Amino acid sequence: MEKAAIKQKIQTLREELEHHNYRYYVLSQPEIEDYEFDMKMKELEKLEAENPEFFDANSPTQRVGSDLNKEFQQVEHRYPMLSLSNAYSEGELRDFDQRIRKLTDQSFEYVCELKFDGTSISLQYKNGELQQAITRGDGVRGDDVTVNVRTIRSIPLKLKGENIPEEIEIRGEILLPFAVFDRLNAEREKEGEALFANPRNAASGTLKLQNSSEVAKRKLDSYLYYLLGESLPSDGHFENLQAAARWGCKISEHSRKCATIDEVIAFCREWDEKRHGLPVATDGVVIKVNSLRLQQYLGFTAKSPRWAIAFKFKAEQVSTILQSVSYQVGRTGAVTPVANLEPVLLAGTTVKRASLHNADIIKNLGLHISDTVFVEKGGEIIPKIVGVDTSSRHPMAQAVLFIKNCPECDTPLVRNEGEAAFYCPNDAGCPPQIKGKMEHFISRKAMNIDGLGEETIDLFYNQGMIRNIADIYELKKEEISQLERLGDKSAERILKSLEESKNVPFERVLFALGIRFVGETVAKILANKLINIETIQSASVEELTNIDEIGGRIAESVYNYFRNEENLQLIERLKAHGLQFELNETSLQNRSEKLNGLLIIISGTFEQYSRDELKKMIEQNGGKNVSSISKNTSYLLAGNNIGPSKLEKAQKLEIPIISEEEFLKMLE
Ligand code: IVH
């Protein structure tokens, strides 16, 4: 075949396959047999492999993903991803309606939509092609997860049809259907892997997987519900969603236009019942003003639009039997009680366990084994026990008494004054603590050691190859590659990332040590203030508490850590391996006290530096980057496209507004 003909053939196959994807995954109305589809796919794969010059990231063949993904890039959202304000009662819905009617005399309509409980996504389309898919992140910037989103069959890689704006952003929710969730967890249980708490977590966890071919296997779904852009087809939100449906997007068929708040309330009541029959999780109804012109007129508060509200369904409750209580020991030695329940269906998933948090909660509930308990799943991840039906308790039932010794190493537990948790103090000899510390050490935000994961640490530990974090640096290639499941390649990868971790900056090494109460932020503060490990080691509790933001609890924990001989030996060994135990040259040179004590808020986009870089500069020079404006804020560092409400608030509180240039001058 001639090149032009091949190109044409590839094009036709791509269009056909996308059409059948759409029929199957968006409309649930397939036109052809799976076999026929697979044959066409094979044909396209072959043509693409033979003609790599026609590669297209948006080809249907790419929906199977690859295992080459690197860490996700952080990208700034074009329009910040705000949240919605909530209403928990019909009265609050009426208040919302009144607020709007006070602001306008016009007649208007609402659109009621289901509030899907997954993970939100922003899709950028340019000339109809999917360019970028970004997670919500902190609302201002999110992770670029395009490679993973391409594997979701209900998300069009190319929009089809007419009147597609040149540039458009479409937002929606990525979901894992209940049926897939249950299957996934059943598999994980069989493999002895940690279970996902709910479909929402499973969906967001899946979207962040490093290996997109794994994502493809998980069968995520989507509903899109919000269009943004300069040239949308209509003034009506509802009408725009209909247009998006014509372009191939999956839009909920249950959305409804309502003329009055009574109709809105009726919709909410109706779906509070009907939602139990849906294949995906919903946690409420979103009510939006339909007209975009009116939306614009009503505008936004700092956090959410004035033209929309989320009506939250009441958390579902069920009763079941408490079978037993088990205890888990975490990396810091904290012991968490977990209730084992007779399996029961709650909000679409089977619940077998509930967190009991600490001894006080058990005592306050007055729990007895075999009690009938009420379990609720609210916004939080893990279901909790909210009450006990004492009337059905057996007279001989045994009260649940918190254990006295560590379930893993039998050491007597201790409880520090003023703290709710019991701890196992045997941090150097208690297996889950040792393993937990090593897992924390290698994690992405700490030393980021690629190739080592929880399972590998487990394996090395069980084989007696490692007993602490310094041992990790003494692993030999032969030792690793002789293990089943690992080979030469994995061994090389592990050793390479161990080598690379020697460049990880001091503040992250400090965080990686796993000192109790020293999280990322505290580690940063300590590193920036005290510069090297020796100064931190010799600092007194008083010297530590004198540092801004370091309280007594943290200071004592840091002080005690360095009074433990084993910890000191560990640090000496890590030093000998070449890890960073002081701020590096550039951080040192860039340090000053010029912004000492200043609280600076960053907003908008900048010309010379990214927001992260500006944040770092503020911190290195003694200032603090804060996220919301108050009367204590010292400066608003304003870039382009800064939100009008933020500017307004700064002006009202008379907070000086500075540009990037002025900020850089302050540091000169
Ligand atoms: S509209 C500016 N519509 O709820 C408002 N959001 O608390 C844009 N959500 O982060 C959101 N279903 O992830 C909208 N039909 C729906 C939704 C929905 C679920 C989520 C979304 C958002 C959160 C808001």
Image (cartoon, rainbow, N blue to C red):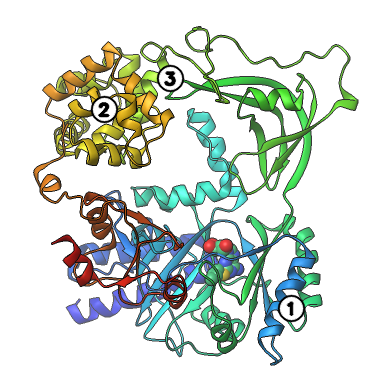
User: Residue 66, how many percent across, how many down?
Assistant: 31, 52
From the image, which quarter does the C terminus lie in?
bottom left
**Where is mark 2, residue-wise?**
486
In which quadrant of the rendered view does residue 603 lie?
bottom left
From the image, which quarter does the N terminus lie in?
bottom left
- Dot 2 surroundings within 10 Å: few (below 14), some, or many (20 or more)? few
**Where is mark 1, residue-wise?**
98
Instruction: Looking at the image, tell me whether mark 3 or mark 2 is earlier in sequence order.
Output: 3
Residue type indicated by callout 2 = Leu
Label 1 residue SS:
helix
Separation (CA) of disc 3 from disc 1 = 55 Å
User: Residue 548, how many percent across, how many down?
Assistant: 34, 41
User: Residue 45, how many percent across, how many down?
Assistant: 30, 62
Residue drawn 41% across and 34% down? 551
Residue type indicated by callout 1 = Gln
Residue 167 higher or lower than 18, as above or below: below
Instruction: Looking at the image, tell me whether mark 1 or mark 2 is earlier in sequence order.
Output: 1
